[in-house]
């Protein structure tokens, strides 16, 4: 709900309020962001605000950095990180933005060419105008009564005739009052994506960012700001995440008066965007999620929001295909003869889709060649894709196919025909990460070409599933097609090209299910989820490592968005041996599948696979729609445990793992939060009946198991 009168603005979500006012000197001041307040409370909030607002009778230009101002400007008295920097023709870039007008619109704004929230109740748009340049900034706030997510972005307009260079164009600024906060970040590297780290926020600027052209394995575009006493189950926190998939920045800064300033958006390192007179620049949306139920409440709020309002509604709640993917089974070394046994076995085990990974096209016998040539390699696959698809159909399976649309090898027909389509700068030796170059997706003709060749494959073959990979970062940031003064636009234009291709393919093939991937989970963000309902979480499928990766990822992405496969042991990434059951149990907490040669499995493994698939079909509805409760963190002690509860609390699914056999750590309990306390539940595997209250207050004894062994419990409400 939005209450606005041109002087004060009060927005409410389910459990939060966000209050702003215009000071007597015309600045937009934030009065409150946190738990609910009422309109009547505005009076005293304004009185508090008055004490830090710049007044006309003082040297107001020196007072800005004490005020919780809604948009930080550069070079004029506000010495915190600016939200935007606007450089004029004469090189000047100081600015001072003041309130001009507001409007309230129904619903949520659509952003052409970029992922955006698909629905919302209403949107407040507040326009600020720069005193010193022709820049106007529209601040967007979309709220809905039934969520705790506030959607923010800014549209920067050049209202004059002369071009203005945007040197920074962040999406939002928000502030939290004086207090002690910790920051939760999701950090990692390839194979160890999104490990949560929680640390106190120190004085100065804390900045999370990616300069890689994608959101990266290293630091996800999410930061949690936790009040000192915030835990998994209780306390206040705010999750800040970007609906963006390119180079980004998120900052938290302590300012003089002790308020914490949060900002972020497109990464400004190397950024510059020329805004011609009359043009506007739309920044990506940011999602701010308030929780007074700890990190668990924050995650559940984000999961619901992404499922209900971001991920493609045509697919989000549909049963996910249970796939077998041939990558770890064969890598590049396959023929149809090697793949047929996998396909034949898959249908016997209840698997429904065979996904053919890298290596099916061009001269793709290794990662040195072929990328860009999206025509089937008939030397490897006699009878082409058709023969494989027929084999799948004969077995009642659907067929999925891997692409890496953004890439090219120098040894490819595409590169030989269009060397200038690869990102590189004449005279600079290109970085050949994984032996490949990145295509210049800032160029429309390149995106058009890739759309043409990929859609041809999709049109000519019965393909129900596409895995869209992206295996390297962007270097030599430069486009031969952009003039010198526009090179700073490269990174953002690149990701706009990716979004354009994704949107066109999604629109042309609405029934095809798209899975994202970036060398494992290197581009796992809310922007990608707008197009791809699930994303390959990590190349590390080890039954223990995955507890950590999935735990971290679940902090701000729903279980159904995480693609999770059972692979062989010793694990290809860690060499660790974990029980087959464990690999299945942990993978069942996401979009489930296999990544191995089914035909080489032992009979026992085959029987287990059949059981795992059957069991997954019992719980996949919970994974798609349920509420997640993280019960035991693998980062803290010797157990991992998570539970998903149906919205009506009639059933729940618990998966746990005991990491090491340590003497005497047996009498450990898990407390099942999230159940209906007044209901009685039956735990099928334990043959126990107990009330939701007892299961939470008295808990359940954790099983005594050996290294990396796991369990699952199905709970059903009896009364
Ligand atoms: C990286 C992905 O994460 C893998 O699953 C696989 O698709 C390879 N790329 C193929 O090159």
Image (spheres, rainbow, N blue to C red):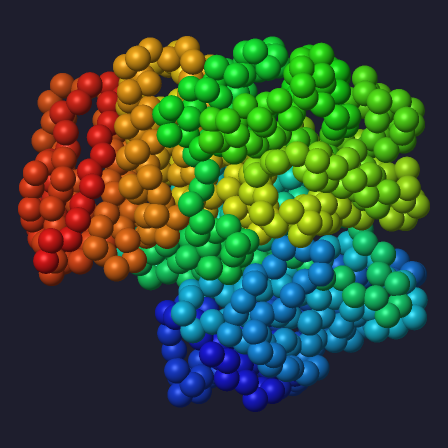
Quarter assignment of residue 147: bottom left
Asked whether residue 262 is in view, the answer is no
Please determine whether, in this image, residue 581 is positioned above or below residue 635. Answer: above
Which residue occupies 82% across, 39% down?
449
Q: Position of residue 631 (x, y in %)?
A: 25, 42
Q: Position of residue 598 (x, y in %)?
A: 42, 17
Which residue occupies 47% across, 71% down?
144
Q: Nearer the viewer, residue 221 or 613?
A: 613
Q: Nearer the viewer, residue 49 or 631?
A: 631
Is 147 left or right of 658, judged from the image as shown? right
Q: Position of residue 430 (x, y in %)?
A: 81, 23
Q: Nearer the viewer, residue 34 or 593?
A: 593
Is 461 left or right of 49, judged from the image as shown? right
Which residue occupies 72% across, 45% down?
501
How many discs mark residues in the rendered view? 0
- In which quadrant will I find the C terminus? bottom left
Asked whether residue 462 is in view, the answer is yes
Q: Nearer the viewer, residue 318 or 31?
A: 318
Please determine whether, in this image, residue 301 is positioned above or below residue 337. Answer: below
Which residue occupies 11% across, 53% down?
718
Quarter assignment of residue 290: bottom left
Is 541 left or right of 7, judged from the image as shown? left
Q: Position of residue 36 (x, y in %)?
A: 37, 74
């Amino acid at each position: 709900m939005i209450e606005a009168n041109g002087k004060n603005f009060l927005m409410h979500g389910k459990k939060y309020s966000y209050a702003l006012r215009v000071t007597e000197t015309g600045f937009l001041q934030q009065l409150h962001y946190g738990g609910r307040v009422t309109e009547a409370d505005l009076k005293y909030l304004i009185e508090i605000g008055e004490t830090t607002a710049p007044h006309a009778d003082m040297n107001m230009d020196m007072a800005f950095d004490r005020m919780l101002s809604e948009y930080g400007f550069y070079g004029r008295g506000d010495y915190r990180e600016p939200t935007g920097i606007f450089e004029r023709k004469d090189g000047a870039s100081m600015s001072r933005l003041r309130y001009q007008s507001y409007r309230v619109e129904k619903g949520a704004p659509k952003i052409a060419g970029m992922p955006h929230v698909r629905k919302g109740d209403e949107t407040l748009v507040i326009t600020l105008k720069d005193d010193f340049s022709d820049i106007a900034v529209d601040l967007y706030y979309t709220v809905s009564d039934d969520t705790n997510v506030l959607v923010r972005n800014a549209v920067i307009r050049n209202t004059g005739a002369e071009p203005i260079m945007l040197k920074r164009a962040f999406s939002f600024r928000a502030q939290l009052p004086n207090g002690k906060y910790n920051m939760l970040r999701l950090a990692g590297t390839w194979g160890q994506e999104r490990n949560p780290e929680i640390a106190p926020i120190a004085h100065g600027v804390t900045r999370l960012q990616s300069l890689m052209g994608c959101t990266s394995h290293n630091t996800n575009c999410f930061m949690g700001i936790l009040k000192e006493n915030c835990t998994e189950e209780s306390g206040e926190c705010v999750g800040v995440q970007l609906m963006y998939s390119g180079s980004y920045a998120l900052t938290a800064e302590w300012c003089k008066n002790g308020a914490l300033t949060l900002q972020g958006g497109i990464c400004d390192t190397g950024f510059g965007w020329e805004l011609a007179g009359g043009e506007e620049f739309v920044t990506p949306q940011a999602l701010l999620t308030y929780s007074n139920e700890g990190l668990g409440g924050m995650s559940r709020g984000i999961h619901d929001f992404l499922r209900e309002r971001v991920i493609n509604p045509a697919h989000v709640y549909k049963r996910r295909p249970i796939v077998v993917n041939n990558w770890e089974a064969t890598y590049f070394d396959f023929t149809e003869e090697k793949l047929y046994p996998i396909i034949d076995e898959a249908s016997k085990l209840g698997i429904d889709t065979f996904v053919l990974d890298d290596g099916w096209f061009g001269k793709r016998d290794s990662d040195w060649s072929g990328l860009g040539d999206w025509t089937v390699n008939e030397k490897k696959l006699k009878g082409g894709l058709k023969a494989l698809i027929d084999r799948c159909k004969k077995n009642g399976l659907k067929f999925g196919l891997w692409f890496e649309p953004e890439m090219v090898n120098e040894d490819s027909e595409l590169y030989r025909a269009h060397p200038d389509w690869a990102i590189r700068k004449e005279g600079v030796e290109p970085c050949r990460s994984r032996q490949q170059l990145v295509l210049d997706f800032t160029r429309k003709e390149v995106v058009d070409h890739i759309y043409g060749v990929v859609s041809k494959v999709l049109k000519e073959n019965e393909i129900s599933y596409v895995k869209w990979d992206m295996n390297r970062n962007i270097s030599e940031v430069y486009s031969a097609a952009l003039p010198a003064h526009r090179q700073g636009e490269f990174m953002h234009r690149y990701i706009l090209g990716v979004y354009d291709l994704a949107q066109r393919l999604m629109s042309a093939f609405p029934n095809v299910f798209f899975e994202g991937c970036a060398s494992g989970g290197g581009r796992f963000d809310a922007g990608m989820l707008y197009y791809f309902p699930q994303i390959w979480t990590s190349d590390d499928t080890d039954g223990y490592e995955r507890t950590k990766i999935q735990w971290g990822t679940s902090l701000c992405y729903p279980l159904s968005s995480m693609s999770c496969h059972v692979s062989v042991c010793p694990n290809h990434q860690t060499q660790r041996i974990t029980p087959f059951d464990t690999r299945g149990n942990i993978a069942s907490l996401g979009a489930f599948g296999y990544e191995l040669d089914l035909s080489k499995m032992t009979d026992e493994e085959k029987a287990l696979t059949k059981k795992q698939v059957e069991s997954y079909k019992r719980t996949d509805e919970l994974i798609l729609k349920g509420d997640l409760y993280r019960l035991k963190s693998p980062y803290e002690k010797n157990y991992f445990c998570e539970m998903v509860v149906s919205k009506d609390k009639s059933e729940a699914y618990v998966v746990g793992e005991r990491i090491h056999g340590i003497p005497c750590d047996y009498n450990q309990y898990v407390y099942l939060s999230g159940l209906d306390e007044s209901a009685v539940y039956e735990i099928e595997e334990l043959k126990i009946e107990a009330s939701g209250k007892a299961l939470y207050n008295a808990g359940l004894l954790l099983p005594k198991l050996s290294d990396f062994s796991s369990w699952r419990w199905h709970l059903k409400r009896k009364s």
